[in-house]
Image (tube, coloured by chain):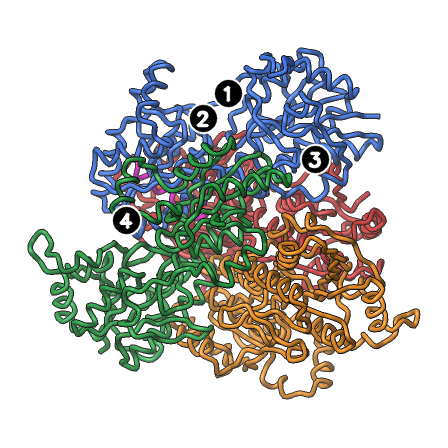
Chain colours: A orange, B red, C blue, D green
């Protein structure tokens, strides 16, 4: 008997269900004696032993369905060793659930924080296989995470729609795209949507450069400007502050989000009308795009393959178009940033995009 | 020779180009000697005699294109008789342009404010034909305006996407839908997207009723709640304030928009996490939906028909599925509200939707 | 106790689930003691007493889901009184099931054929309420059926995509749209997609007129022509044949469908390359569009209302924007055709569309 | 002065305009003195010196527009040295145009056949840079061609829609996907759409295997089967025929396309109803997906870069996520097939997909 625990952790994204379907179909393609324990709401389900027994039938028809049939929650890594309100050590609780159910392997779908906890569980002796899930595409060790392309599609659609209304009105439009620490979604959606200015956490901006870019467009007869800004975009001066100083500064201003801060700055420095659009959580909702479905299905099948071969302690990944595996210990805690000097940035600049920094 | 002036005024929306294409194709289907004067950026182009001569070719291929090829701007009705910075009376200026160009008719596409000005021009002796354009569907005299169904589609898509992420997380999600004075888009998108609570300007809400509805869902095992709220939704107590009092109250709080106000209230009264999505101007962007293309094309052809018959002073409209015409003087200044006692509200309630008022 | 049988019959379409959800939510909004008997695969389930007991929970989350959770099948009206292979009279069998289960009412969702059988069941003394489901929008007694607008959206999307490839290549493109007897989908999708020629069952075509229209476009510098043709479009000469003669003629030629026949004719009469696209069953697939969701939800709630008031023998309908009811006996067996002399046809002609007949 | 000729050749696809925009914006980002000669309808325009002078403004706003603003046509490589009706040698004519206009470089966007001609022009001494355009993704030397992902998206959407109608009816549905020689689009759309059987030109099928797969599903209670078949899918027995024998056999049967042949075979061997959907040219139509827009923009900028550096005789390509260049002589005439033994095929099998061969 093969006993597999499965959970999805962190913010949800598209193709979580597709990936789990791949794992389960892959396991049943070779074995009949598989039991799937679906832990509810991420690590919480593992901590409190809250699970459902699932059959292959539960994973039929979910390839195209957004969200996760297991539910998810955020369980910060740094609180994992902090006892809960009843004094329960969460890591010990997870180990206890795992051993009590006599699991052969725990399959974890998640992003950066999730992988830190998964690696800790591996260090504690559990058999763990992970799948790289995040719209942010910021996981080290894989060229691509599922959820990313779907998020890019939605953010691009937002910019596309803003484009038509922008051509009717002479204004500055700010579209705030998801990404607190990394700018992959903003970069790709910005290029795909034909944004004029793209602001990323990795490339601190200068408000004067932005205003100049807007004015240069106006002089060229282009009456509107579209700015794609990542949630975590930051000005050059703010980037120099310490974490504490920055927090204090932000607390004073209390903008709902970066787009509102940026809009205020632009309006102060120019006399342009500014409009804000925040697609927000729609970027992680709805049916996964075909690209993500194929990627997630492949990664799922590859994860099944590792389990069938009893190779544990890996994240399945895609590198150079091939599905592969990466040791969990190498992945945990590392982020993949946009390199300001990379080719894609240079190519984007060649098509007239300003990154607000020079 | 038939000399036709044309302009689009107010906020843009989908199918403006489709409607203008319908007018122009309709005119050229019967006459070869048509001159089209396209005024730039709404009434502004008429005031300052800023126009382009357009041929039928300019209207080819724009059926599916969002925005307006003429550009648009907001020119408040109440400022029309207020001289500009050079002392120019705008109404006189518009009449002057009209007569100078020896126009046979002015075709105006716009919403409520636009129609007030159009009617004033009619009263000043100009031949005017208007087309009912607005995502708000709040124009009196027509069952439907073009732009509305496209906006509903986009707002619904937003709610759909939020739905999948909502099923993964236990939260309250607020989707803010366009509509300051009327709630048509919110009502239709809310029903179509399966929102649990719909808040409209026409039905003032009680925050306690909302919180109770959220808790009732929780007790029934439904861990998330989706609220579709119109920009102009208002609480029962605020609805009792005078305009001045309300303004003062809002100035104090200074919420970016109604969704932020609502979120704060809900978080205070319950311990639910709340997430906000504001699709904003995307609701008026992008290619018109097929419904709007057919409606706009038909209205455009009907407008051409009126011009060819020299029947002026009308808005073309759709009533009971038939394209018809309504005297401008009857339309100007009247809004079409959602009736809280109408069948659609009752039917929506029967499917479990709360309007936050009882 | 309220015992309700429910079935979906004929070809499936979008919003069947949305409509059933409306009925069930509507019933439970007033009563707790409701039992829903879901008959499987249309009338077949009623004949052979094949059903599932459903709870309100089964209808949760299906607002946006295409297809029908009950399954469907075609059970031709004219075979209803023809005994099956075991000598079973189907009508008597349906009555038997109905009475055996002690049903209060049978809710039937279907199109034209389905309504004939539903009316027969009414004549046999059963309490029946029907909902107008069909992409064809050909049901007499209602301005609109659910499924129609969704089908128009998909057919229009097909024409839109063909448009971009058409502008790259100089060819004639034929898009075959669903509709054997009536042309509503083709007419609306044709106008919305900017088709140059629209061929409907209701307006027999002359191949020479079509070829002339293509050549007229060529002379005007428009190198491509897009033809939207309904499955049941027919030439003037074929329209004069008797049913038997037509069948014999078609048997000889054996075209896969009307588009192939038309392509051959055009290629013979002109030296144009012709390309065929047949979206086929995609037109009845996928998530319903927001328009259909609202319509189906409203009709469902209205059906629930009739049941709660014990008013039977009606089809719920929409007329002039209001949800209403029509006696089943008036609906059964009547089709709603496109009137060749209607306003919409005249308006379409004004925008340059040829109907291939003059 | 930099004089650049540009043409798009072969079947059109999404992101051709996006790619040309990338090239032109890239050139103007470094130089002001650029002249763009846009040859009309592919090599035809170069042969007969039919071109338009284009400015950077012509390439503004076309990022999202399907088709090609230059038009395209198929000019078979094997006819390039065959004189036209006036005795004109086409290759010499192209060289003549090139030299007459004193071009610095010819930028060619096309697929496999196009690259053979481009390489011949290079051999004749012309400076040529090419971009890999094709929905088929069958160009050797690049991991990805633009157009592919957009085509996959559309084919997947077709399968998605068929899925909902399939769950309502018990039938076999065949979706015919573009690809005469290679099966990349069918493979990816098949996996993404959750097809049960995928038939590719690279993996000849056995009809008995297909029928068995259908019956196995039936026994497992899955009443429908969806088959994604590439246009060029072939049976094992036909794959053994000589080209001549195959042609003769096909001429006898004269199926409109492979889906019709397959449907007949399945209906003969089982008593299943079969339905056919042929999305056809829609697969190359409409706005490019964001993935293709980013890829095309990057490739365009990279092509500009090569021109600015006077490095000619290359196809720009993407390999392992990096934009790179490949010598034209290595690319010309080589196809990239799906390897029946590759990981993706094995992963697809693990999720239950049958390739009809074993």
Decide if residue B219 is on the left or right side of residue A355: right
Marks 2 and 4 close (CB-CB < 8 Å):
no
Q: Which of marks 2 and 1 precedes in the sequence?
A: 2
* Foreground residue among C205 and D95: D95
Q: Which of marks 1 and 3 precedes in the sequence?
A: 3
Decide if residue C136 is on the left or right side of residue A121: left
In the displayed orientation, state which residue is furthest to the right.
A86
Pinpoint the chain carrying mark 4: D
Q: Nearer the viewer, mark 3 or mark 4?
A: 4
Residue A179: horizontal and vertical position, in percent? 61, 71
User: On the image, numbered disc 1 is attached to which residue?
Assistant: C335
Residue A158 versus residue B229 in the image, above or below? below
Q: Which residues are magenta?
A: B16-29
Pinpoint the chain carrying mark 2: C
* Foreground residue among A92 and D12: A92
User: On the image, numbered disc 3 is attached to which residue?
Assistant: C22
Which SS does the magenta portion mostly show? helix
Residue B184 versus residue C121 in the image, above or below? below
Pinpoint the chain carrying mark 1: C
Check chain identity for marks 2 and 4: say if they share one: no
Calculate the distance from the C-alpha at mark 3 to the C-alpha at mark 1: 26 Å
User: On the image, numbered disc 2 is attached to which residue?
Assistant: C182
Calculate the distance from the C-alpha at mark 1 to the C-alpha at mark 2: 8 Å
B27 part of magenta stretch: yes
How many residues crowd around disc 1 within 10 Å: few (fewer than 14), some, or many (20 or more)? Answer: some
Query: Which numbered circle lies on residue D242?
Result: 4
Check chain identity for marks 3 and 4: say if they share one: no
* Residue at point 83%, 67% (across, down): A99
Question: Which element carries disc 4, helix, strand or loop?
Answer: loop
Check chain identity for marks 4 and 1: say if they share one: no
How many residues crowd around disc 3 within 10 Å: few (fewer than 14), some, or many (20 or more)? Answer: many
């Amino acid at each position: 008997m093969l006993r597999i625990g499965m959970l999805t952790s962190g913010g949800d994204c598209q193709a979580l269900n597709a990936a789990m379907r791949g794992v389960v179909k892959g396991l049943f393609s070779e074995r009949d004696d598989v039991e799937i324990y679906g832990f509810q709401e991420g690590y919480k389900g593992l901590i409190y032993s809250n699970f459902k027994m699932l059959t292959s039938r539960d994973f039929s028809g979910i390839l195209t369905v957004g969200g996760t049939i297991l539910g998810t929650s955020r369980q910060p890594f740094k609180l994992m060793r902090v006892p809960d309100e009843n004094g329960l050590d969460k890591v010990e609780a997870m180990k206890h659930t795992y051993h009590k159910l006599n699991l052969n392997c725990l399959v974890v779908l998640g992003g950066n924080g999730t992988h830190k906890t998964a690696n800790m569980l591996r260090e504690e002796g559990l058999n763990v296989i992970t799948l790289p899930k995040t719209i942010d595409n910021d996981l080290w060790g894989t060229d691509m995470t599922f959820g990313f392309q779907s998020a890019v599609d939605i953010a691009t659609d937002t910019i596309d729609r803003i484009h038509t209304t922008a051509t009717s009105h002479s204004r500055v439009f700010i579209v705030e795209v998801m990404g607190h620490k990394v700018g992959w979604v903003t970069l790709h959606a910005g290029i795909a949507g034909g944004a004029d200015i793209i602001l990323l956490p990795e490339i601190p901006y200068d408000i004067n450069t932005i205003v100049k870019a807007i004015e240069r467009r106006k002089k060229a007869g282009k009456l509107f400007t579209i700015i794609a800004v990542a949630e975590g975009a930051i000005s050059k001066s703010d980037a120099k502050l310490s974490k504490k100083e920055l927090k204090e500064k932000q607390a004073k201003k209390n903008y709902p989000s970066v787009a509102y801060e940026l809009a205020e700055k632009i309006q102060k420095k120019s006399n342009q009308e500014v409009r804000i659009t925040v697609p927000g959580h729609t970027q992680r909702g709805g049916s996964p795009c075909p690209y993500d479905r194929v990627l997630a299905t492949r990664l799922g099948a590859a994860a099944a393959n590792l389990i069938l071969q009893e190779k544990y302690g890996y994240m399945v990944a895609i590198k150079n178009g091939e599905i592969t595996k990466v040791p969990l210990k190498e992945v945990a805690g590392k982020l993949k940033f946009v390199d300001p000097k990379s080719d894609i940035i240079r190519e984007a600049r060649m098509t007239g995009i300003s990154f607000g920094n020079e």
